[in-house]
């Protein structure tokens, strides 16, 4: 059973949640589990070059971003609460991040650890990254810090930029499946948000184990996630996930139609028109395709051609009139 942990390593609740998940799994008697850490960004505008956290927290933009780590609490209230709970969880003895820095490169390393070394290697990297940030007050945006963590975990340090595409796709997947806070556990389509107590995590895992989802091919999952991003108003994100499907399954109608819709939503009208004209040629009786094509032609400044397509769409489906 795969347990996905979507979290940001600059979110203290992620470290607390890690300890609580470990305690829940220590008494686990269900099916074998595999834990995979996946990226979430609570502060995506954090600088690549670290700045003192105390100074950064005076910025209302940063204050707002960090509220995603603990909805309902101010960052100051969250820090007080977290310090107490971290001590209860045995984290420390010193506690508290000293730097505001981008977690982008740390997430690249964590993803690479899972890909190249599996769950155990990834867990070692995650633990060292979290400890460096919250206990040792290190700068986890510093390449030297991350290289040391990689070597200590027995994996090769990452060259600059390696894994950027994979990380972007993982972040988009998280958005698509509805991850909105750090940490969030996802098992078989079920989600548990926040660093919940071990007994709550155990109940969640037992419920997920007792009702395993039907296996869905990875390509279908990707298509659904791309559609979710489009529905959320992120057509460029949808197209990013669709890119691999268009390369491998470019003849699939569902893939092509979703790509055409994303082109329309992103105002890539030339691509949208080309894709829709091919689809209409293959399925001339599809009213929805003609409706989309008519709207694209109208936006391109071709009123007569647009009117013809829109009339046909309305004749086929009066609701489109």
Image (spheres, grey):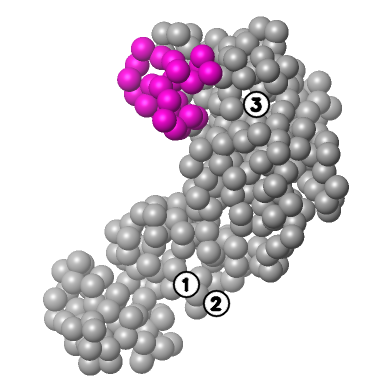
The residues colored magenta run 57-81
In screen coordinates, is 298 left or right of 179?
Answer: left
Q: Which residue is mark 2?
A: 251
If you read the primary sequence from the N terminus, does the residue marked by circle 2 or circle 3 appear first?
3
Q: In the image, residue 273 lies at what x, y percent?
A: 32, 72
- The chief SS type of the magenta part is helix
The quarter of the picture where the C terminus appears is bottom left
If you read the primary sequence from the N terminus, does the residue marked by circle 1 or circle 2 appear first?
2
Q: Which residue is mark 3?
A: 16
Q: Nearer the viewer, mark 1 or mark 3?
A: 3
- Residue 295, visible in the rendered structure: yes
Q: Secondary structure at mark 1?
A: helix
Are the residues at dot 1 and dot 3 in contact (C-beta closer than 8 Å)? no
Are the residues at dot 1 and dot 2 in contact (C-beta closer than 8 Å)? yes
* Circle number at residue 24: none
- Residue 44, visible in the rendered structure: no
- Mark 2 crowdedness (10 Å alpha carbons): few <14, some 14-19, many ≥20: few
If you read the primary sequence from the N terminus, does the residue marked by circle 1 or circle 3 appear first?
3
């Amino acid at each position: 059973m795969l347990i996905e942990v979507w979290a940001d390593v600059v979110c203290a609740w992620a470290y607390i949640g890690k300890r609580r998940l470990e305690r829940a799994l220590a008494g686990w008697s269900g099916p074998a589990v595999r834990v995979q850490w996946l990226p979430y960004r609570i502060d995506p505008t954090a600088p690549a070059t670290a700045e003192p956290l105390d100074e950064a927290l005076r910025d209302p933009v940063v204050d707002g971003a960090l509220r995603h780590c603990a909805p309902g609490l101010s960052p100051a209230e969250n820090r007080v609460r977290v310090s107490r709970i971290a001590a209860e969880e045995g984290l420390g003895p010193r506690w508290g991040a000293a730097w505001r820095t981008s977690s982008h490169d740390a997430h690249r390393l964590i993803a690479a650890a899972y890909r190249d070394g599996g769950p155990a290697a990834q867990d070692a990297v995650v633990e060292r990254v979290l400890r460096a940030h919250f206990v040792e007050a290190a700068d986890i945006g510093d390449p030297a810090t991350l290289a040391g963590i990689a070597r200590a975990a027995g994996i090769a340090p990452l060259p600059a930029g390696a894994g950027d595409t994979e990380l972007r796709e993982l972040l988009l997947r998280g958005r698509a499946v509805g991850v909105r806070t750090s940490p969030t556990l996802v098992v078989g389509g079920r989600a548990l948000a926040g660093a919940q107590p071990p007994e709550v995590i155990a109940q969640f895992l037992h419920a997920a184990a007792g009702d395993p989802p039907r296996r869905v091919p990875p390509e279908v999952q990707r298509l659904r996630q791309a559609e979710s991003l489009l529905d959320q108003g992120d057509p460029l994100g949808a197209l990013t996930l669709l890119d691999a499907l268009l390369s491998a399954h470019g003849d699939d109608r569902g893939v092509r139609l979703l790509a055409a819709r994303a082109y329309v939503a992103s105002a890539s009208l030339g691509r949208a028109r080309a894709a829709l004209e091919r689809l209409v040629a293959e399925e001339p009786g599809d009213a929805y395709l003609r409706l989309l094509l008519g709207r694209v032609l109208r936006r391109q400044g071709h009123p007569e051609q647009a009117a013809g397509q829109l009339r046909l769409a309305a004749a086929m489906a009066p609701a489109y009139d």
